């Protein structure tokens, strides 16, 4: 726990393996509460986050009861943004790329019938996060082989007291790209990355796949990928750059080879639906740039530990 907490505090990504049994949600709640407390998140936001992470963790357990997973679910926590816009991002990863009920959820989450015994988890997340949540294809952080799957995420604002940058950040483009390259290598991209550095111009370029490149120059990083609007991050947001790059790669690969999503859902809802509704941090309206998203009341809460 302490190692993961230090990683979050220093703007790296804290990652924990969640048990693939009924204790999964409880472990996720305790981990989230500990990190949120150390970031001075506040009681209400912490309680909301504990409820949401419990719902996401419980969803992975429901999925594993229907299908054996090659690795256990994972909990990822990291900070993104700067100044008054720092957020704690919480993601729960599992190796099911689709959804058991077939309908890929989006911001227009359909309400579950009042007499239903389950299925309200994402309604709860939608409400408590003020619509600042989503899902995307990605790869495991802890398997060592970059096993494919999806992550469902939400974010909560972090007060200035808990958002102070910690640790040391890359100063040059070369150092920033080295950090990105090392992190991507641990997620199954080792041996496939092509890199070029121009030290004199303080610039570095990393090719991940055809049409997918990451650029670093003069304390800024940005991603170029088909169908993605160019975004720019500071070097303290390299975790977000990495997350965006992995997601873009997985969407490109899955679009080219739809068989990767065979049996992902009962009804065959696959990549096309996911591509339309997948919500990536920074690519859709967020807490700081909301769209006209419908709001639904939270109908169930899980008591925190």
Image: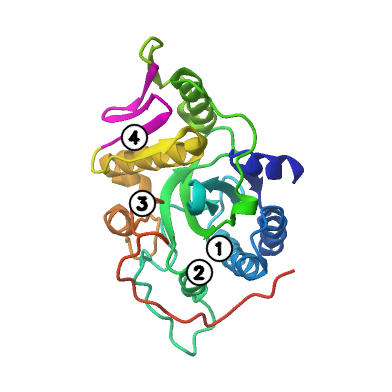
What secondary structure is the magenta-colored segment mainly? strand
User: Along the line of sight, which residue is nearer the eye, 110 or 203?
Assistant: 203
Q: Nearer the viewer, mark 1 or mark 4?
A: 4
Circles 2 and 1, Cβ within 8 Å, touching? The answer is: yes
* Mark nearer the N terminus (2 vs 1): 1
Residue 205 sits inside the magenta stretch? yes
The x, y position of residue 286, in whole percent, is: 39, 59
* Res. 132 image quadrant: bottom left
Real-space Cα distance between discs 1 and 4? Answer: 28 Å
In the displayed structure, 301 sits above or below 140; it is below
Determine the secondary structure under disc 2: helix
Name the residue: 33% across, 44% down: 251
Name the residue that disc number 1 marks. Answer: 56
Residue extent of the magenta highlight: 202-225
Name the residue that disc number 2 marks. Answer: 125
The x, y position of residue 164, in whole percent, is: 61, 45
Q: Say few, some or many: other residues with alpha carbon within 10 Å of mark 3 (under 14 / 14 to 19 / 20 or more).
A: some
Q: In the rendered view, does 283 fall on the left or right side of 59?
A: left
Q: In the rendered view, does 237 fall on the left or right side of 35?
A: left
Name the residue: 55% across, 63% down: 56
The C terminus, quarter of image: bottom right
* Mark nearer the N terminus (2 vs 4): 2
Q: Nearer the viewer, mark 3 or mark 2?
A: 2
Name the residue that disc number 3 marks. Answer: 262
Name the residue: 55% across, 30% down: 186
Q: Say few, some or many: other residues with alpha carbon within 10 Å of mark 2 (under 14 / 14 to 19 / 20 or more).
A: many
Name the residue that disc number 4 marks. Answer: 223
Determine the secondary structure under disc 1: helix
Q: In the rendered view, does 109 fall on the left or right side of 74?
A: left
Q: Say few, some or many: other residues with alpha carbon within 10 Å of mark 4 (under 14 / 14 to 19 / 20 or more).
A: many
């Amino acid at each position: 726990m302490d190692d993961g907490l230090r990683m979050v505090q220093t703007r790296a990504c804290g990652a924990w393996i969640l048990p693939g049994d009924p204790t999964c949600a409880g472990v996720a709640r305790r981990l989230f509460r500990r990190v949120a407390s150390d970031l001075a998140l506040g009681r209400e936001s912490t309680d909301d986050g504990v409820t949401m992470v419990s719902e996401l963790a419980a969803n992975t357990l429901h999925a594993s009861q229907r299908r054996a997973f090659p690795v256990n679910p994972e909990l990822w926590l990291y900070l993104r943004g700067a100044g008054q816009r720092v957020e704690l991002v919480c993601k729960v990863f599992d190796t099911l790329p689709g959804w058991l009920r077939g309908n890929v959820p989006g911001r227009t989450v359909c309400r579950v019938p009042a007499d239903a015994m389950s299925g309200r988890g994402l309604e709860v997340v939608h409400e408590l996060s003020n619509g600042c949540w989503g899902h995307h294809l990605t790869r495991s952080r802890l398997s060592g082989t970059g096993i494919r799957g999806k992550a469902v995420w939400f974010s909560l604002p972090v007060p200035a007291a808990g958002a102070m940058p910690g640790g040391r950040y890359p100063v040059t483009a070369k150092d920033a790209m080295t950090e990105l390259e090392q992190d991507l290598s641990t997620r199954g991209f080792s041996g496939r990355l092509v890199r070029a550095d121009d030290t004199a111009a303080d610039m570095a370029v990393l090719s991940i796949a055809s049409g997918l490149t990451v650029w670093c120059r003069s304390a800024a990083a940005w991603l170029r990928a088909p169908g993605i609007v160019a975004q720019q991050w500071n070097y303290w947001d390299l975790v977000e750059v990495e997350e965006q790059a992995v997601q873009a790669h997985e969407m490109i690969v899955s679009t080219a080879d739809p068989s990767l999503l065979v049996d992902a859902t009962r009804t065959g809802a696959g990549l096309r639906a996911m591509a339309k509704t997948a919500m990536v941090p920074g690519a859709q309206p967020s807490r700081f740039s909301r769209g006209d998203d419908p709001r639904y009341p939270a109908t169930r809460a899980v008591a925190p530990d």
